[in-house]
Amino acid sequence: MRRLLIGLGSLLFMLATIILVVPLFLPKDEIKRQVVEQVDKRFGWRVRLDGPVSLSLFPGFSLVAEDIGLAGEAGADGIEFAKAERVEFGLAWGGLVSGNIQVTGIALDKPDIYLEIGPNGTTSWEPRRDISDIGDLIEAETGDAETDAVAEATPAPAPASEAGPAETAAAPEGYLKSIGVDSLQITGGTVTYKAPDAAEPVRISNLDLSLQAPSLSGEVDLTSSFTFREMPVAVAGSLTNPLALMGGEQVPVDLKISSGENSVSVTGQSGLDPMRAELALSAAGPSLKALAALAGQDLAADPGAFAVSAKVAGTEAMLSLADLDITLGQLSLGGAADADLSGSVPEVSGRLVLKDGSIADLLQLAGRDLPASGKLSLDLAFATVGQTGEELLAGLDITGSVRIAEGEIGGLGLASAVGGDPEADRLTNLAMDIDLQGLENPISLSGALSWRGEAFSLTGEGDTARLLAGGAAPVSVSVKGNRVSAGFNGRASRDGALDGAVSVDTADLRGLMAWLGKPLGSGGGLKRFKASGIFGVAGETISFEETRFTLDDTSGEANGRIVLGGKPSVTARLDLRELVLDPYLGGASSSGAGSGGGGGSGQASGNSSAGGGKRGGAGGWSTEPIDFSGLNAIDADFKLTTSEIRWDKIKIDQSALSTTIKNGVLTANLEKLALYGGSGTGTVTLNGASATPQVAAKFALANLNAYPLLRDAADFSWIEGKANINLDVTSKGGSEQALVQALNGTANYTFADGAIKGINVPQMVRGLSVETLLGWQANPSAKTDFSSLGSTFQIQNGIAKTDDLSLIGPLVRMTGKGTTDMPAQRLSWRVEPKIVPTLEGQAPQPRRKGEDKKLAGLGVPIVIEGPWNDPRIYPDIKGILENPEAAYKQLQQTGGELISILQGKKEPSQELVDQANKVINQATGGKTQIDVQKVLDGEVDDEEVLKAVEEGFGLPSGLLGNVFGNKKKNKN
């Protein structure tokens, strides 16, 4: 036993000595030379071994070298496609005896492999020489190819995969046998692949690879792990009998690629000559987003778990995909496809079927993670031809149908646009049918949906083939609801560009805008709106042409463009047939209130209780805030022409207006204005850039027919003739009332060859009566003719003053002055007429040039005061009594009923008594119980009441007593 142990120990010592000592005596340089030579012969690559080289006999015969490089054809330029810190070449034991070194295995430590395809198609790993006959060469050297092929394999998966079918088919079976490498090991490697058409190279790191091929007639196993796109990937596979595969037989293949819990597997049989395969594909995992990331696709949302299975069969002439089953969440898609590869251009056809799929899952698959529900079904058949993705898409033809039922989609982000209504963020009751009869025919859709509780129907057609090709395509869409209907018929593209006919129709524009969260403010009008025209959208520019529209009673045509951006810019030209302002300026209501007063000229006098249009009447000016700050929102340039403008009774003929809005300031230039037989120009400026709204206006109107103008504009029917009006005013304020109170400027007017209707001043003075003293009343048939009437006003803080009122007529001259208090809407005027005493018995006589007709020396001053819609007009008795003797003499000369009564020559008429009762009733506010007729008849002793009436009207003391007392005495 002792001898046995000593023997074994001696043997082990001898073996250890051999392992440690023998390599020191082996010819390392020769072995190194043969290794380099074999790699060059077998692969066509030049090996650079610049670092230290050592030999080892344990655990196998091997050559270990440091700082190694591999170069192919490009190596002539000093470029190496692979470098490694350390390499170990496994060597056959037979080389120790024969001296012929054979490489049986390669192990690379931390290699850096760079695989590049150049612009001309050459590769960085391309062999330095033609190696098609290398098999015969090595067989001749070794004597027996079968015994030399201990275990062969390809040196690296990347070069093998890039070799291409033609090169693989060209390589003879003998070459594969002669490689003589039965294992390839890579530890901690890096591989970079750069294609000429790729923007960025593909890079994998942390590569660990093991390729075992002990027999090429047996099974070749591959295991590998690496990091790709910052995700760990594992690859495992096997190929049975590579020699049979190269010989044209079908052999089993098995490959599995996994990343985390996601995996893709391929199993089946495949052959190379001729090319054919029968494979089963399967893929599954908890995250489709992670699997898509490996393919370079970034999904916005993760649809979740997935499963795919299919059978693939193919040859060089055809390829078929059968039993396709894709499950994604609640989506279950089935189908099949066939490809004919026998012609010069591949032809592909197939069918996809989806039943009751989840809309939410489909949106996730499209990258939209939105709250949704409902069912989606489709049945589509497709066919296409082409060699590239672009060609296949361009040649695509689809027939079939798509249906959406019970749909609801949220997260639209529209709540803020409509005043914060959360219901605006979702579509409900979504039902849609889409019919495709080939992409050469229009795709049609019809359906319905609800938004914010309103139901809409939807129909449309489109040229899908052109849309998919990325070009502009004919599209028509129509949406109809109770509030609004809209449509588009034109061309649209995927980038959002539009060009075509657009129509909009609503019965209540104001209500629609309020419902959309864009209220238009208080006021009337803005009801019926209808528009149609040619619209275009290109980038941030919206253009509209030949756009015909109707808004309330206004209609016309518009052309222009809108440029969106930081501050939108609008340029437009509007040609209106008529512009009706009643709905917006309150004309309808105003005319209703004032129509009674404006209907007959008999009510034109301010003293009439029913007279006057009540514009700005007792209600006063509005205190509602006025805000021009909205002018800062846009810049605009408008040009407007109209055949007619109507506001209540006011009618304006052809007009032209240009308007600009720049930096919050609106300037409207009235270039042409034809109205009431005359014309005018004007400018209006609204300043919304200042803290307080500012207004400036300047108008010049000439040769206007005054009577219809004043009648229609203010129910003012006192004056007729030709009018010239000039206005230049400014103001500022936050309300209508504030603007009136701050009004400053000048105004003047002149009337020519006209008359003051309702009052004949000369006749009334000549026929002076108690009516004159009690307040003149309107007479529809009476008028005071004049050749000119004019005045100039100075306006300060809303109060207009004048002291140059002048009226010149054939029978009267009148001057006057007064104040119009616009904030209070009151008049305070005093005019002094001078009249011809009588025309009776006077034959017409020519006058010398410059000579006026002689007028009476004393006129009767007239006072006009009170609310401007119902003023009192009465004689200024105080002015008469300042010279009572001259007044009385003048009264005697003019005569009249009053003088006859005062002299006892005439009895007061019943008409006079009735008028007195009316005046007393008006003066006392209707509270008096005095009946003048009873006073005259002596039934009531109310001298004190008559005295009070005299004082109230400013009449001479005892006047009424004398008038009515006479009658009482005569009756007695």
Image: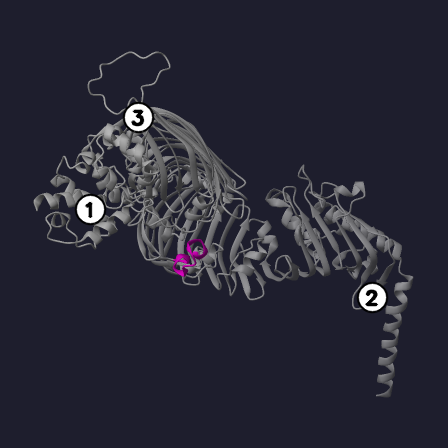
State the image coordinates of residue 237 (x, y, percent, origin top left). 59, 61
* Quadrant holding the N terminus: bottom right
Q: Residue 422 lies in magenta, yes or no?
A: yes
Residue corresponding to mark 2: 57
Q: 223 or 932: which is nearer to us?
A: 932
Question: What is the secondary structure assignment of the residue under circle 2?
Answer: loop
The magenta segment is 415-426
Residue corresponding to mark 3: 856
Q: Residue 220 lies in magenta, yes or no?
A: no
Query: Could you say which disc has been placed on residue 602 in the image?
Result: none
Real-space CA distance between mark 3 and mark 2, rounded to the nearest whole angstrom: 153 Å
User: How did the renderer colour the structure?
Assistant: one colour
Question: What is the secondary structure assignment of the residue under circle 1?
Answer: helix
Residue corresponding to mark 1: 961
Secondary structure mostly seen in the magenta stretch = helix
The residue at the far bottom in this view is 1
| Comparing labels 3 and 2, the label whose residue is closer to the camera | 3
Q: Earlier in the sequence, mark 1 or mark 3?
A: 3
State the image coordinates of residue 801 (x, y, percent, origin top left). 43, 38
